[in-house]
Image: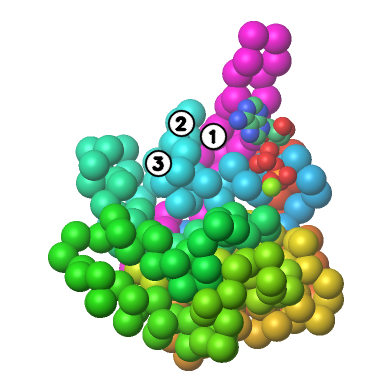
Amino acid sequence: MAIIELKEVNKVFRTDEVETQALENVNISIAKGEFVSIMGPSGCGKSTLLNIIGLLDTPTSGTVTINGTMAANMKDSAMAAFRNAKLGFVFQSFHLINSLNVLDNVELPLLYRHGLSGSERTARAKEVLERVGLSHRMYHRPSQLSGGQCQRVAIARALAGNPEIILADEPTGNLDSRMGAEVMQLLGELNSQDGRTIVMVTHNDDQAALTDRIIRLYDGRQVM
Ligand SMILES: Nc1ncnc2c1ncn2[C@@H]1O[C@H](COP(=O)(O)OP(=O)(O)O)[C@@H](O)[C@H]1O
Ligand SMILES: [Mg+2]
């Protein structure tokens, strides 16, 4: 069964003057455990697609089904709970909080989890920092780390909630090729060793070639 299914998805952004069809009739089915990349030129709808897959945005028409449940049938509270429990997000620009150390950054999303004590949160954050190879940096501030390390912290933060699905929007876009390769290696392991489903937007052909499948967009449409 597909873990994520989009059927006939359209997304139109309307402002006073312009109407942009960001996605046109997109049909996608992603199986549990797949590592999929989304490619295409700037402005073709990649981030819009990832946001719809991640329930951060809704389609203008069409359906999104995650784990067998149609998103449109979920209450906002159920949707938020689902997003919190099942999805982990990684962005190009890390979105770390500089006034907090690495450990606190990773613990932060766990504050919204019910039933976790402070010591359980810390233990969980330490565990995922170990997983991304950054235990030795947990009391540093993000500004004291390299870009690649910052992205690994952001990945640890996404992992803290133990998500089934990781959604990454150009996760190596701000990194040099060596650091980008490190982050790709980590994502690859999270997929192949830990069995997490990953959907990643990338501009990098070599990185996309490492994934199971490439979805290509052009002007909001899927192309072969
Ligand atoms: N919130 C928004 N309001 C209006 N237009 C938007 C909005 N978000 C994206 N767009 C437009 O939709 C198209 C697709 O954008 P996006 O999904 O960000 O592309 P990509 O990630 O492939 O660069 C672009 O033309 C963009 O300008
Ligand atoms: Mg984008």
Measured as percent of width and height from the top left, residue 130 is found at 48, 88
Q: Is residue 172 visible?
A: yes
Q: Is 112 on the left-hand or right-hand side of 156?
A: left
Amino acid found under the numbered disc labelled 2 = Ser
**Is residue 103 or residue 78 the one in the foreground?**
103
Amino acid found under the numbered disc labelled 3 = Thr
Residue under the image location 27 percent in, 38 percent down? 76
Give the secondary structure at mark 1: strand
Q: Mark 3: give few (<14), some (14-19) or many (20+) Cα within 10 Å.
A: some
Q: Are marks 1 and 2 in contact (CB under 8 Å)?
A: yes
Name which quarter of the figure residue 127 lies in. Answer: bottom left
Q: Find residue 10 and name its label.
A: 1
Measured as percent of width and height from the top left, residue 102 is found at 53, 71
For the magenta stretch, what is the residue range?
Answer: 1-28
Quadrant of the displayed image that contains ligand 1: top right
Q: CA distance from mark 2 to mark 3?
A: 7 Å
